Each structure stands twice: as C-alpha cells, then as structure tokens.
Image: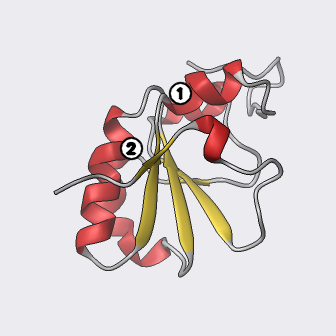
Amino acid sequence: MQIPTVSIHGVPDPLPAGVTVVDVRQDDEWQAGHVDGSLHIPLHDLPARIDEIPEGQILVVCRVGARSAQAVAYLAQRGHDAINLDGGLYEWEAAARPLVSDTGGPAYVA
C-alpha cells in the first residue's frame, strides 16, 4: 500500500477550513510544541480513539514522518482521507510554520 504523503511545500499556509491536523506523538513531545488546533492522539491510542477522527481531510504529523505514515495507513484502511506530512514537524518548524507549547516556554519539536 502506498502511503499518501505531502511535503511541507504542498501544505497551504494557513491550512484551509476542513483540514484537521492529527498529531500522533507522545505526550511530552506534544507538550513541547504542536500545531495550534491540532488533535492529539498518540499512535498507540489510535485504534481505541478512531471515533474521534473527524470526517474530511486529515493531515497526520509526528516528529519526522514515520509514526504518522503508520497512522495514515491505518486511517486509510478505515476509509479516512488521510495524508502524511513528509519530514514531520521538523519540516514544519524548518519552514517557519507556527507551533504552540503547553509548557509555558517557547514551542519546539521534541
């Protein structure tokens, strides 16, 4: 199965209405920095929380794109319109796209 993938240059800025960002990293990674408004569902929780995934296009992110590729494969098999961000949040950050933090400090990709 080919994993639908997009580079950061193919992701509109700002994100269009109707696109949901799903972040599949662990809690500590999420707290350090994430896309504002994204939905946090760690990869290992995805099967139990699949009902939380909204309809519409889903941009799945992690640190470098490996975990999010696994999540996209899983979501696509269940009929979701999901796409993996190639290079993950490292590429997001390198493209100077904004991140927010839950720590009170500056946001960064952990």
Estimate the x, y position of residue 47 in percent, counting from the top left.
Answer: 27, 64
Q: Is 32 displayed left or right of 66 in the figure?
A: right
Estimate the x, y position of residue 46 in percent, counting from the top left.
Answer: 34, 59
Determine which residue is flagged by label 2: 68
Whether 60 is drawn above or below 52: the answer is above
Whether 47 is drawn above or below 33: the answer is below
The circle drawn on residue 28 is 1
Amino acid type of disc 2? Ser
The circle drawn on residue 90 is none
Pointer 1 local density, CA inside 10 Å: few below 14, some 14–19, many at least 20: few
- Secondary structure state at the residue bearing disc 1: helix
Q: Name the residue located 74 percent from the left edge and 55 percent from the top edge.
A: 37
Q: Is 1 displayed left or right of 34 in the figure?
A: left
Amino acid type of disc 1? Asp
- Spatial CA span between label 2 and label 1: 17 Å
Q: Nearer the viewer, residue 30 or 83?
A: 83
- Secondary structure state at the residue bearing disc 2: helix
